[in-house]
Amino acid sequence: MSVSVIMKTLNEEKRIAAAIESALEALQAVGGGEVIVADSGSRDRTVEIASGYDAKVVQIVAPARPSCGLGPQLGFQYSGCEFVCLMDGDMILDPGFLQEALGYLAAHPDCAGVTGHVVEMNVENLEFTRRVRRASPENRTGAIDRMNGGGLYRREAVEKAGYFSDRNLHGYEEFDLGVRLRALGFTLHRLDRPFVQHFGHTLNAYALLVRRWKSKYLRGVGELLRAAWGKPYFGMLLKELPELRLWAVVYGWIAAVLVAPLLAPSLALGLAASLAILALPVAAMSLKQKSLSLGVYAVVAWLFHAAALPLGFFHPRLKPEAWIESKQLPGRA
C-alpha cells in the first residue's frame, strides 16, 4: 500500500525541512510512497528548501490564487498513490501514524479517512490544549464529521466524491470533503493517538480576526453554503453546522438594532432601545466568559463573521474539479 503525502505550504521556510523529513521517515515504515509539496505561491525559501529533498514540488501559477481549499487539490492532482495523507508544511508527522491508520482502513472498507490528534506546540499548556481540542465535536475520537488538520484518506473514496478539496473555499474545506464523503455512505474516524505536531503562528485575537478577514477565511461558511446549494447533502450540511444557527440569531439581533428607532414613539426612545439591544449580547457574553474584554471580542467576532458570510455566498465560483493552474519545479523527485 503506497501513500502520497501532500504537504500544503505558503511561506513555511522555518518548518518545511523538518516536515518533509518526518514524512519521508514515516513513508519508509510503510513501504514507501511520495511526498508532494503543494505550494500556493511562497515568497520565502520554502520551495528552494523543499527542492533539495526527494519530494515533488509543485506551485500555482496565474490565474490561480491561494485559498485554504486550493492547496490540497493542487497536491492531489499530482499524486498517484492508493492512499493520500494531507498535512501542513508547519507540521511534524508522527512516525507511527501511517502504519496504524493504514491498518484501520484495511480493516474498515467503509471508512474513507483516518486521522489522529493534532498536538499544538506553540501554546503554554499543551495538556490543557489537548483536552480542549478532544472535547470539541470535530476533534473527538471515534466517528467524526471532518478531519480538521488533515489525515489519511482512501483515494478511491475521494474520487467518488468528485474532488479532494474545493479551490473556491477559504475555510471549511475539511468539512466540505467530510460531508461529501459521508453523503456517499463513507465514514471518518479519529484514532486516539497523535497524528502530527503543529507549530502554528501565534497572534493576539484581534490581529488574528483581521488577518482572517483579509485572507477571506471568514467567508468560508458562505462559500460552503454556495458550494452545497442544490446538492443532495445540503440538508445534512445545514443540520451539522451549529454556527449557522448562531449567525441567524446575529442577523436578527442586527435587524432589531436597526429597526428599533423606526418603531419607537420617539427618536430618543428608539436610540435608547437600540443601545440596549446592542449592549445585551455583550453583557451576556461577558458574564459567560467572566471577562468584559472576552465578551466584547466575542460580539466583534460575530459581526465580522456576519459581514463575511454573504460575501462568500455570492462570490463567483470556479469548477472545483478543474485542473489548477500550476507547474512542477525542478528538484530531486
Image (spheres, rainbow, N blue to C red):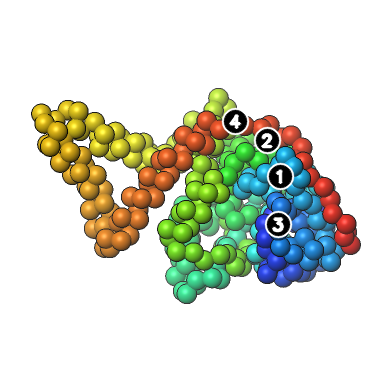
Quarter of the figure that contains the N terminus: bottom right
Q: Is disc 2 in contact with disc 1, using a CB cutoff of under 8 Å?
A: yes
Q: Is residue 126 above or below residue 145?
A: below
Residue 88 is situated, as x and y percent measured from the top left of the image, at 66, 59
Disc 2 on helix, strand or loop? loop
Q: To which residue does mark 1 refer?
A: 73
Q: To which residue does mark 4 refer?
A: 316
Q: Is residue 284 above or below residue 274?
A: below
Q: Is residue 303 left or right of residue 311?
A: left
Q: Nearer the viewer, mark 1 or mark 4?
A: 4
Q: Earlier in the sequence, mark 3 or mark 1?
A: 3
Disc 3 on helix, strand or loop? loop
Q: Is residue 175 left or right of residue 35?
A: left
Q: Which mark is residue 42?
A: 3
Mark-to-mark CA distance, 1 and 4: 19 Å
Callout 4: 10 Å neighbours few (<14), some, many (20+)? few
Q: Amino acid at mark 2?
A: Pro
